Image (spheres, rainbow, N blue to C red):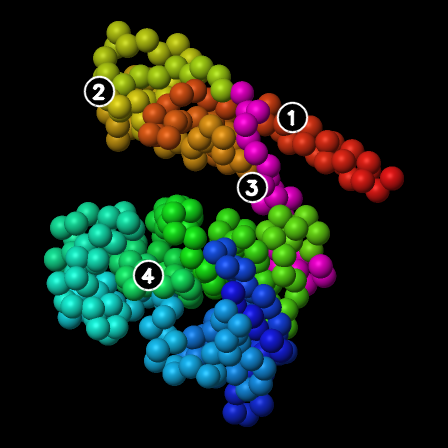
Amino acid sequence: MIELRGVTKTYPGGQTAVNNLSLDIDRGAITVLVGPSGCGKTTTMRMINRMVEPTSGAVLVDGEDIADRKASDLRRSMGYVMQSSGLMPHRTVLDNIATVPRLNGVPRKDARTRASELLEVVGLAPDLGRRYPAQLSGGQQQRVGVARALAADPPILLMDEPFSAVDPVVRQELQEELLRLQRDMAKTIVFVTHDIDEATILGDKVAVLNIGGVLAQYATPEEILRAPASDFVAGFVGRDRGFRHLSFQEGEGVRIHSIQTIEVDRLGDPDAAVTSPWTLAVDAGGRPQGWVPQNRRSAIRSAGDLVPGGSLYRRGDTLRRALDAALSAPSGLGVAVDDEGRVVGSVRAGEILELIEDARVSRGRANYNTAV
């Protein structure tokens, strides 16, 4: 859908930001541009909507050279999400989202109706539409930025490090929200980040750029982690790329064990049974709240006294999620939950490591059989 053909951008003074870049970006997929600062990621993305004009080469969308289109029309045909959300502070959330439809001639009432619908799509409460950007959290502002980019239903969505300014917990939520939206909408998304973890989580394909805007590797995240094309890519991905590679190994075989739980409102009850070295405290809906170590049982009388837990594992998640849940829990037991976040049991690191080793051996046999 998007083709970059020998694109170069050289700024006055001779600094080359992007050097002879050729790239085919697949329709309906997330393509991530990743690399160190100064490698031309953002410049490349901005050449797609002519916010930056290339010095040489061509950018084609559906076979049409974008240089033949009026720049303002081209930009309104694409969604754009930036790092700071870029919301207009003097306009309400609804009017911010309605901006592009209004520029495209959509009546104000219809544009605001569309904006209201999109609030729900991006996971925001309808009453937030009446607020102003300053009255929202950083994560909420970024969701509004995504909604605004989707308001005119563009086939292409450009995202320039949209989640880098929020805290890690909100960032993970926004990443999951983007993947959910993409499953429903199948946009052609070009996503810029400097974070290789974010790139491998979100990207259907990842383009790793080197300093000077040179393409170092363009492949699926799994291939980049498994077989970096150069020492630069290997160094950028990092020494722990084997752990990241677990994100592509299914965790269906992870065994779920029973786990002792206690409701939070019974923490101060001396008759409540707590016999395990670590007991998991849950709320009335069965969702994990923290841990009760047996040797501190008498000191833990409310939710504020609980030992914080680790990450959670949902049945069917990857082996990386399962291992992370087990290793991050103070009890050594990873908490397994259902799709509603209710506790269903625990997972154990030793068993997960055995599954990882079995997968490694099976993959090695398959590669050997293919070679011979």
The residue sitting at the front extreme is 63
Estimate how packed mark 4 is, as few (under 14), some (14 to 19) or many (20 or more) residues with alpha carbons within 10 Å: some
Circle 1 residue: 354
Disc with the residue nearer the chain's start (2 vs 3): 3
The answer to whether 194 appears left or right of 75 in the picture is right
Q: Which mark, residue 247? A: 3
Disc with the residue nearer the chain's start (3 vs 1): 3
The answer to whether 21 appears left or right of 163 in the picture is right
**Real-space CA distance between mark 4 and mark 2, rounded to the nearest whole angstrom:** 47 Å
The mark lying in front, picked from 3 and 1, is 3
Disc with the residue nearer the chain's start (4 vs 3): 4
Estimate how packed mark 2 is, as few (under 14), some (14 to 19) or many (20 or more) residues with alpha carbons within 10 Å: some
Instruction: Judge by depth and name the residue closer to the eye, 225 or 188.
Output: 188
The structure residue drawn at horizontal position 14% and vertical position 67%, both measured from the top left corner, is 108
Circle 2 residue: 265
The structure residue drawn at horizontal position 59% and vertical position 27%, both measured from the top left corner, is 352
**Real-space CA distance between mark 4 and mark 3, rounded to the nearest whole angstrom:** 31 Å
**Real-space CA distance between mark 3 and mark 1, rounded to the nearest whole angstrom:** 16 Å
Tell me, yes or no, if residue 210 can be seen here.
Answer: no
Within the image, what quadrant is residue 248 found in? top right
Are the residues tagged 3 and 1 within 8 Å (C-beta)? no
Q: Is residue 241 on the magenta stretch?
A: yes
Q: Which mark, residue 153? A: 4
Q: Position of residue 90 (x, y in %)?
A: 15, 70
The mark lying in front, picked from 1 and 4, is 4
The structure residue drawn at horizontal position 30% and vertical position 22%, both measured from the top left corner, is 286
* Three-letter amino acid code at the position of disc 4: Asp
Above-or-below relation of 261 to 63: above
Q: How many discs mark residues in the rendered view?
A: 4
* Three-letter amino acid code at the position of disc 2: Asp
Write the start and end of the magenta stretch as one range. 229-255
